[in-house]
Amino acid sequence: MSAVVEHDAGENGKQDFSMNSITVSSEAAAGKKPRSRLRLPDSRAWLAAGQWLVTLLLCAFLIVPVVMSILAGLTVNYFKGISSGFTLRWLGEVWTQYHGSVFLSLEVAAATLFITLLTGVPAGYVLARSKTRLSRVIEEFLVLPIALPGLASALALLVVYGGFTMFRMSVAFIVVGHVVFTLPFMVRAVAAVCASSDLRTLEEGAASLGASFMQRFVTIVLPNARPGIVAGALAVLTLSIGEFNLTWMLHTPDTKTLPVGLADTYASLRIEIGSAYTILFFIMTMPLLVAMQWLGVDATGQRSAAKKRGAASATKSITTP
Amino acid sequence: MTLASIPASIPITLTQCAKTFRGTRVLEPVDLRIEAGETLVLLGPSGCGKTTTLRMIAGLETPDAGGRIAFGNDDVTALPIEKRQVGMVFQSYALFPNLTVRGNIGYGLKIKRVPAENARRRIDELLAMMRLTDHADKPIDQLSGGQRQRVALARALAVEPRVLLLDEPLTALDARLRDALRSEMNTLLRDLGITTVYVTHDQAEAMELGDRIVVMSAGRIEQIGTPRDIYYRPANRAVAQFVGTINRVAGERRGGMLTTIGGAVPLPSAHRALSAQSDSTHEIFFRPEDAFLADPDHAQLRGLIESSAFLGERTRLTISGAAPDALFVDVAGRVELARGTPVGISIGHDALIALS
């Protein structure tokens, strides 16, 4: 062995040497304190094994059903299993029957986003600035539709507006429901960013340079609140596309959104078609989820704060000689 | 480097300006006149009302009913900040992170709809003056602290303000940079000749930059005066103790002398006339650098070295037994005296300060 090592390049020799030294030292240590030295890695190994077990179990519960569902949507016959072969037939069937729902869902989501942007951004700004008791009360009321079951909000809407047939039958009714449900997410995300004292000082700076309120809002507040607005917008879109409880109560045969259609297919058609529908859903929402991850935004605009801190520390290190 | 475009400077007048926040008086009624072209420093510990005063001048706070603020002959009390034409530098600089250096400096010009060509020339001029030309197109977060400070100043000056308001503009910087920028700022303010209000809690900044200093504490103006007035002729104990270090000698007045435990100090003639109440307890004050070590046999006061702190250019001695309170005396840095050494100290005759 040693002859081979000598024959080889120096690096191998070094490695061999260091390996030797490690074994020597560990032997010596084992001789001195055999128990603690041996038991410590043991318990660590158990801990690691436990962590792996929990992680894998969680993955199994979370991921396996998704994978199975996707597979079910692609197999010819789910009860025969994969051996029956793969097909895109179910996807095609779902598309021909429900493509209307896809576009409707997108329309509803877009309209919901439009309204929440128009109302939620100013509301978030004002709520963040106002220190009155009334604004705290309004904030609480805004969150109510999240705390209450969607069914309750839907019933309330039906009781009040059910009589206006034209309105009740239109897509606008669904949009209203979605706005009620998603608005707090937009308001919260925007308010979190606007509440920072930094933004307030920036506004004072702009005002000292002669900018009127509207000029400040457009040139300073909106650009600097962007992380919060983007976070809110993505939350609104995903929530609107996935919303079921409330929509199910509000919908009519003409206003079926994606999740309502999904319930329909699972309830009344083959499991393969329902699963194919899930795939369709998956394809629609994945880009949104990826966008959220990619932008790294959560509801409070955390990412941007972390970024800023990083930049600040970087400049600090530049400043100090 | 001159900026000829700065308009003629104007005075600022505050009349009976007080401020109450939610029932708490943070500023007692203030009367203040800032002369045209003057640099006035508001000096005081945090919470003394100096920033509130500045924000009232800026238009970010409104004074309580009855207070009036005038720029020259214009009453601006009711004008919001965006209509007051002030240039303001914030402690955190408040630079716009969504804009470049050029965008920040040009922001006010854009708001005022200055023609693009004129604006560009003005921005270039300011960039050159602040030595920022190489950084013109960088975003704010790529600048060092000192550069940010200069951008903030350039941005405030770009709009040709009637008055310049600075809220602790050097506090965010580290000590060495602060010293360098302080003298830079001094030169700049002298060159500009614009009416300036400068808020700080740092007395060195106040001394160097201020034509006059307003010492404030607990919402009140304690004294208004030149840096020398404030330092050598403080109006009261609060001022004397906030600005620099001061020693107190308490004793009994006997025939033109103040007799205390370590000896006697001759009182200045003004003093003798001043206090009619004879033989009463009396106090006199002096600055650590105004006393000198003397032969104990011929010195005014005798005491023992309690401690000695070497500060580089000087040594600060703490002397006990000379007066009821320990006395601080500054001597040359090379002086070394062991603890317990008996020393004599004398105080220059015109360096004695009387305080009410």
Image (cartoon, helix red, strand yellow):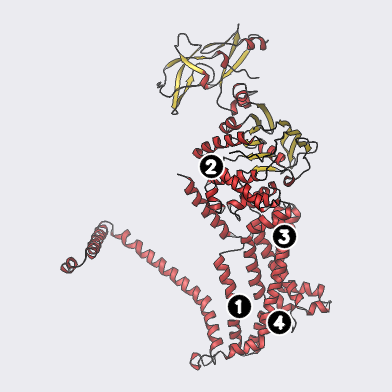
Q: Report whether mark 3 lies on the same chain as mark 4.
A: yes
- The 10 Å Cα crowd at callout 1, few under 14, some 14 to 19, many 20 or more, is some
**How many angstroms separate mark 3 from mark 1 (CA)?**
29 Å
Residue that numbered label 4 is attached to: A256
**x, y (%) of residue B212?**
64, 29
Helix or strand or loop: what does disc 3 sit on? helix
- The 10 Å Cα crowd at callout 2, few under 14, some 14 to 19, many 20 or more, is some
- The 10 Å Cα crowd at callout 4, few under 14, some 14 to 19, many 20 or more, is many
Residue that numbered label 3 is attached to: A122
Q: Of tags 2 and 1, which is closer to the observer? A: 2
Confirm or deny contact between disc 4 and disc 2 (CB under 8 A): no
What's the residue type where badge 2 is placed? Leu
Tag 4 or tag 3, which sits nearer the N-term? 3
**Front-most of residues A316 and B131:** B131
**How many angstroms separate mark 3 from mark 2 (CA)?**
36 Å
What's the residue type where badge 4 is placed? Lys
Q: Is residue B302 above or below residue A40?
A: above
Residue that numbered label 2 is attached to: B173
**How many angstroms separate mark 2 from mark 1 (CA)?**
51 Å
Q: Quadrant of residue A226?
A: bottom right
Helix or strand or loop: what does disc 2 sit on? loop
Q: Report whether mark 3 lies on the same chain as mark 1.
A: yes
Residue A284 numbered tag: 1
Tell me the quarter of the image containing the N terminus of chain A: bottom left
